[in-house]
Image (cartoon, rainbow, N blue to C red):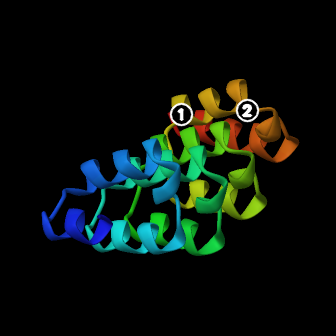
């Protein structure tokens, strides 16, 4: 049945919906096929947030390869414990987020309420 569905050439949106809604489709093979459909970064971030089987370094690398914007990365850090790492914070900073986005992340994510992030926020304010 899944092979037939693939023959219909679904869009990445349709395919992510299928992964999201169907337990049977929540497999590594299905995620690999989904990646071949060239999904948008914000669709990938939802899968990472929602599904533990998508919370892998490989999937994060794929997400980063899609050049997500700082707003989506901050959302993912705030919503997904798997992404609350120093590596993701450094990646987020490399995107040069604006002051308001950094402030939002600190306000909404306990993980980001650190001296380092407060200093980063302060440096953003000084550039306003």
User: Residue 77: image x %, image y %?
Assistant: 64, 45
Position of residue 106 measured from the top left corner of the image (x, y, whole percent): 71, 31
Which residue is tagged 2? 109
Nearest the camera: 24 or 29? 24
For the residues bearing labels 1 and 2, Cβ distance under 8 angstroms: no
Position of 28 with respect to 12 (left or right) is: right
70 on left or right of 106: left
Residue at the front extreme, as displayed: 1
Residue 7 pos. (x, y %): 15, 70
- For label 1, the SS is helix
Q: Determine the secondary structure under disc 2.
A: loop
Q: Is residue 81 above or below residue 24?
A: above
The residue drawn where x is 27% and y is 67% is 38
Instruction: Classify 10 Å Cα crowding around label 1: few (below 14), some (14-19), many (20 and above).
Output: some
In percent of width and height, residue 85 lies at: 76, 57
Q: Residues within 10 Å of mark 2 (few under 14, many from 20)?
A: some
Residue farthest left in this picture: 8
| 98 w.r.t. 15: above or below | above
Of residues 102 and 3, the one nearer the viewer is 3
Please tell me how many numbered marks the rendered image carries: 2
Q: On screen, 43 above or below 9?
A: above
- Residue 94 occupies quadrant: bottom right
- Is 35 on the left or on the right of 84, as rendered? left
Q: Residue at x 18, y 58 (%)?
A: 10
Q: Toward the viewer: 1 or 45?
A: 1
Is 76 left or right of 1, judged from the image as shown?
right
**Label 1 or label 2, whichever comes before in sequence order:** 1
Residue indicated by mark 1: 101
Q: CA distance from mark 1 to mark 2?
A: 12 Å
Which part of the image, by quadrant, shows the N terminus?
bottom left
């Amino acid at each position: 049945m899944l092979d037939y569905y693939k023959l219909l050439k679904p869009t990445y949106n349709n395919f992510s919906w299928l992964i999201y809604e169907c337990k049977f489709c929540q497999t590594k093979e299905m995620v690999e096929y989904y990646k071949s459909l060239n999904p948008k970064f914000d669709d990938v971030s939802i899968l990472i947030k929602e599904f533990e089987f998508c919370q892998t370094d490989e999937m994060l690398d794929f997400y980063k390869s899609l050049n997500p914007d700082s707003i989506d990365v901050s959302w993912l850090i705030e919503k997904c414990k798997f992404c609350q790492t120093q590596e993701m914070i450094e990646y987020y900073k490399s995107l040069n987020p604006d002051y308001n986005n950094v402030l939002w992340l600190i306000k909404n994510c306990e993980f980001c309420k650190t001296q380092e992030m407060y200093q980063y926020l302060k440096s953003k304010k000084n550039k306003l």
